[in-house]
């Protein structure tokens, strides 16, 4: 939709119908509508160090739970038996606090794979923090001293941040109305970036026209610059969004073709090639490999040192013989312990991150 590419297409493909992908149009419109608020919310929460403090608290709570068999068993039992449906035993405040802090940190779990602006993880982070704060305050009164309530409170009482969040929520609601009118990138389809939307282009066009000329949108566009730009964007590219069927000549006669709403076919092919390359190489990026090389290089280089190798061999004739003498059960147990020690969250915990209003449910459970 840039001026340069539009002029180039018109020059190189003169007379050829040129249309805009509905997904990309809606994505760019959403960015223009509330990208400023979104970035500013992120900057505010970073300036208060909210996420950093919660990450630190999460690690402290996890260590305390892991070092206490009773607490660890309680957490494991809770996650295994899905006791959100109702628990007979009361959850320890430390376990409840750990689950709530992790739920706030993993706010991106509420997203659906469309990317910004369809997903707004930083806004969701603030809203989860706001919702969980009263519960965290109760837990601190019950003895969970590591909770950084002072820092969380500073962020939540910031009047400018509250105003930003409120303004963005209003804009997101308008964006969602247009998203529903365009029938594209809908959550209920569970197709993520592969969602091609409905095919009834005439019905979609009439729905978008009703949205564009509704009294609410006209009022907002007349009083707010960002909404005025949104309306102007819709008007400017209207003819490139809603195409009538095209009649083309083929060797077998005339054929009517309805232009596709998205460029998903091309992008799906590109994503397939990326996945195929990752499967063959086993690498998503080289960063982990390079970090591993820095740590492992001295160990490998030391194999050229006879004294170092002699220490490793412990009387064996070769490394193969030395490795053969290792107790495989001990290795497996140590690997299992390492996985448990370094795994970010215990198994089955990730499913809790998607649950809306988790603080209410957890505090009801903890009160039993």
Image (spheres, helix red, strand yellow):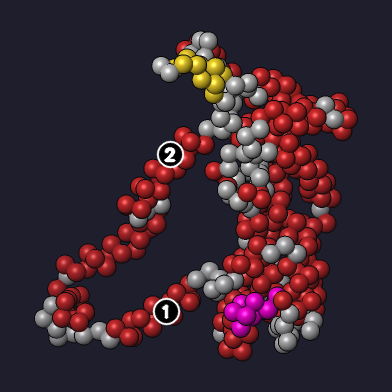
Residue 82 lies within the magenta run: yes
Tell me, for residue 336, which label it has, or none: 1
Question: Which element carries disc 2, helix, strand or loop?
Answer: helix
Mark 2 closeness class: few <14, some 14–19, many ≥20 residues within 10 Å: few
Mark 1 closeness class: few <14, some 14–19, many ≥20 residues within 10 Å: few
In primary-sequence order, the first of circles 2 and 1 is 2
- Residue at screen point 53% across, 10% down: 15
Q: Residue furthest left?
A: 317
Residue 12 % position (x, y) = 47, 12
- Relative height, residue 25 to residue 109 (above, below): above
Q: Is residue 286 visible?
A: no
Tell me, for residue 269, which label it has, or none: 2
- Residue at screen point 73% across, 80% down: 86
Residue 197's image quarter? top right
The answer to whether 13 appears left or right of 312 in the picture is right
Question: Which element carries disc 1, helix, strand or loop?
Answer: helix
User: Of residues 183 and 308, which is closer to you in this image?
Assistant: 183
Residue 174 % position (x, y) = 78, 39
Residue 95 lies within the magenta run: no
- Identify the magenta region: 77-84
Quarter of the N terminus within the rendering: top right
The answer to whether 112 appears left or right of 148 in the picture is left
* Separation of marks 2 and 1 at Cα, in angstroms: 39 Å
- Relative height, residue 75 to residue 200 (above, below): below
């Amino acid at each position: 939709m840039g001026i340069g590419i539009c002029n180039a297409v018109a020059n190189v493909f003169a007379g050829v119908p040129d249309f805009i992908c509905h997904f990309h149009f809606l994505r760019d419109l959403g960015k223009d509508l509330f990208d400023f608020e979104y970035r500013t919310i992120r900057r505010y929460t970073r300036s208060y160090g909210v996420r950093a403090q919660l990450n630190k608290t999460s690690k402290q709570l996890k260590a305390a739970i892991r070092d206490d068999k009773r607490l660890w068993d309680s957490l494991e039992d809770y996650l295994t038996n899905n006791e959100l449906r109702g628990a007979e035993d009361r959850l320890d405040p430390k376990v409840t606090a750990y689950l709530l802090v992790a739920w706030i940190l993993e706010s991106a779990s509420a997203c659906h794979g469309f990317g910004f602006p369809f997903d707004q993880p930083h806004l969701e982070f603030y809203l989860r923090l706001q919702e969980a704060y009263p519960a965290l305050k109760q837990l601190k009164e019950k003895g969970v001293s590591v909770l950084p309530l002072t820092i969380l409170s500073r962020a939540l009482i910031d009047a400018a941040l509250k105003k930003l969040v409120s303004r963005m929520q209003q804009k997101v609601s308008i964006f969602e109305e247009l998203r529903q009118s365009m029938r594209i990138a809908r959550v209920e389809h569970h197709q993520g970036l592969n969602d091609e939307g409905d095919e009834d282009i005439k019905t979609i066009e009439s729905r978008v026209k009703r949205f564009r000329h509704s009294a609410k949108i006209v009022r907002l566009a007349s009083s707010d610059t960002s909404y005025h730009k949104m309306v102007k964007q819709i008007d400017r590219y209207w003819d490139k969004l809603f195409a009538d069927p095209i009649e083309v000549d083929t060797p077998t006669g005339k054929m009517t073709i309805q232009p596709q709403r998205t460029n998903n076919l091309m992008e799906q092919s590109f994503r397939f090639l990326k996945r195929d390359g990752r499967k063959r190489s086993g690498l998503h990026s080289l960063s982990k490999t390079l970090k591993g090389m820095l740590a492992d290089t001295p160990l490998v280089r030391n194999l050229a040192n006879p004294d170092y190798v002699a220490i490793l061999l412990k009387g064996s004739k070769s490394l193969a013989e030395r490795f053969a003498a290792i107790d495989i059960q001990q290795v497996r147990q140590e690997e299992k312990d390492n996985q448990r020690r370094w795994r970010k969250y215990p198994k089955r915990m990730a499913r809790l991150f998607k649950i809306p209003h988790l603080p209410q449910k957890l505090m009801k459970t903890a009160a039993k």
